[in-house]
Amino acid sequence: MLKRLFSTAVAVFAVVLSSMAQAADPELEFVLELKVKLGQAFSCGENAHGTRFVIPITGGTFEGPKVKGEVLPGGADYQLQGKNRTDLEAIYCIRTEDGVSIHVRNNGIIKGNYFYCSPKFEAPLDSKYAWINDGIYVCKPSGFMADGIALKVWKVRDAFNFESTIGDIKPIPDEVRKANAKQGKIEEFKYTAHTTDGRTIKKHARVYTPYGYNAKDKKTKYDVLYLMHGGGDKTTSFLTPPQDWLPLRNILDNLIAEGKMRPIIVVCPTFYDDDENIGQNAMNDAIARTRDFHIELQNDLIPTVEKKYNTYLEGTDSVAITKSRDHRTYGGFSMGALSTWYQLAYGVNAVKRFIPLSGDIWAYNEKGEKQDAKFAAEWMNSMLEKTPFANDFEVYGYTGTKDIAGNPEKATVEALHNYAPLFRYATPDANLHFSMKKDGEHFYGHINEYLYYALPILYKK
């Protein structure tokens, strides 16, 4: 029995280690600083291991990027002073500014100038601070006060290492570029959209249905992938004619026919009024349209397109759309990637999975000035914190090393890793994934290669 349990444990560890094989060495992320007030220490006398001292904790404060509040009185630091070192264990509670109590147990060692501790936090699972439960932390003194001590706390995590992702995107098999005998269909879908300035306009999208799709078969349901084109492009940019560089249609047909992914429906809309207006919109107008497209998606496109086709949507109101979000993915290239990030920020209630392809987050301050990746990451985290889906989304980012948007997207992913606690990168439970194609450039031929690798992950057979 013990041998079998040991073998099982080894197998579990092997799986975890395998998934972390490409992870970088650890680094530290600052979490908070504690300023703990201490009372008069007293001795409990000498025992077999040394002399025990108790130092009451009488209050204090704490603050970090994502949490702050007060240290509650009533705890204590229990120190065991031996011949060569002192072992300490501090047990107390802290309370956030919005009234959530978090239990703290901090164990450490003092030996000469070496003074390090490893605190453990216990926050309620139903609170917005549950993230603090899952981590290994270290702390050390950051200063001393007349009535206490200041301690800085860091979380141990993997360093951001995008280099390990280069090479994930390998040249795709030549046969995938060719048309498959079992071809899906591409058709035009017309619908009515309502603009943010109060206009009602006629729009269209291109829709791919997989081989064997039967409109009369209401029992068979399909997930839906929405793909948004780049600036100046159109609804046919992804679902191109067969003779173009690398038709997404061929990728979909071949992946489905080979059993590498389950059949899905793909919808390619436009954030412009319609294809005829491409090129006539200034950049600021295009940015506004990508930012606001989530409104049209949820109010106009999803209810009409998913009602016509056999999808998991039951009903056309916002409740039904939210209920079916697990079966919906939104992605896009370039300005379409910007639309993808905005969809995540403003419309995560309607979509669970996101594929930003060669595009970063554009976030602006109150003066309308575009800000850096750190600001954008913190803004994105704050937007998601306001929703019920702060811990229920997935992002799969792709770009190339020679792509004009490659470094900006890499900087965005790194900033999310560093400054947005809701995003988990390079961990066993990661919800943020990122890959770069060596020599990948900013055009659909490479973008569709990324989808060749992304789609089987998102739509496992």
Image (spheres, rainbow, N blue to C red):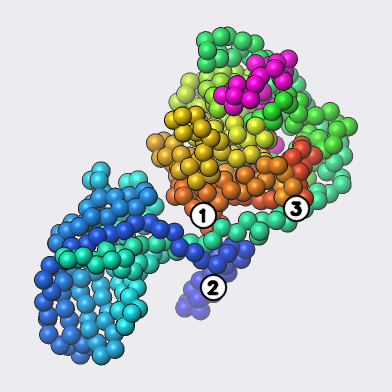
Question: Taking the image as drawn, is residue 34 in sight?
Answer: yes
Q: Is residue 4 above or below residue 297?
A: below
Comes first in the chain, label 3 or label 1: 1
In this rendered view, identify the residue nearer to me: 211 or 434: 434
Residue in view at x 27 percent, y 55 percent = 62
Up-down relation of residue 70 to residue 227 (above or below): below
Q: Report which quarter residue 150 is drawn in.
A: bottom left
**What residue is shown with label 1?**
429
| In this rendering, the label closer to the viewer, 1 or 2 | 1
- Please, what secondary structure does the residue beneath circle 1 have? loop
**Tag 2 residue:** 10
Amino acid type shown at disc 1: Asp
Q: CA distance from mark 1 to mark 2?
A: 19 Å
Identify which residue is drawn at 59% across, 24% down. Answer: 284
Q: Secondary structure at mark 3?
A: loop
Q: Is residue 323 above or below residue 43?
A: above
Q: What residue do we see at 69% from left, 21% from top?
A: 205
Q: Give coordinates of residue 401: x percent, y percent.
A: 72, 50
Q: Could you say where residue 349 lies in the image, as x and y percent from the top left? A: 48, 32
Q: Which residue corresponds to mark 3?
A: 438
**Range covered by the magenta-colored residues:** 263-289
Instruction: Pick the residue in front: 352 or 340.
Output: 340
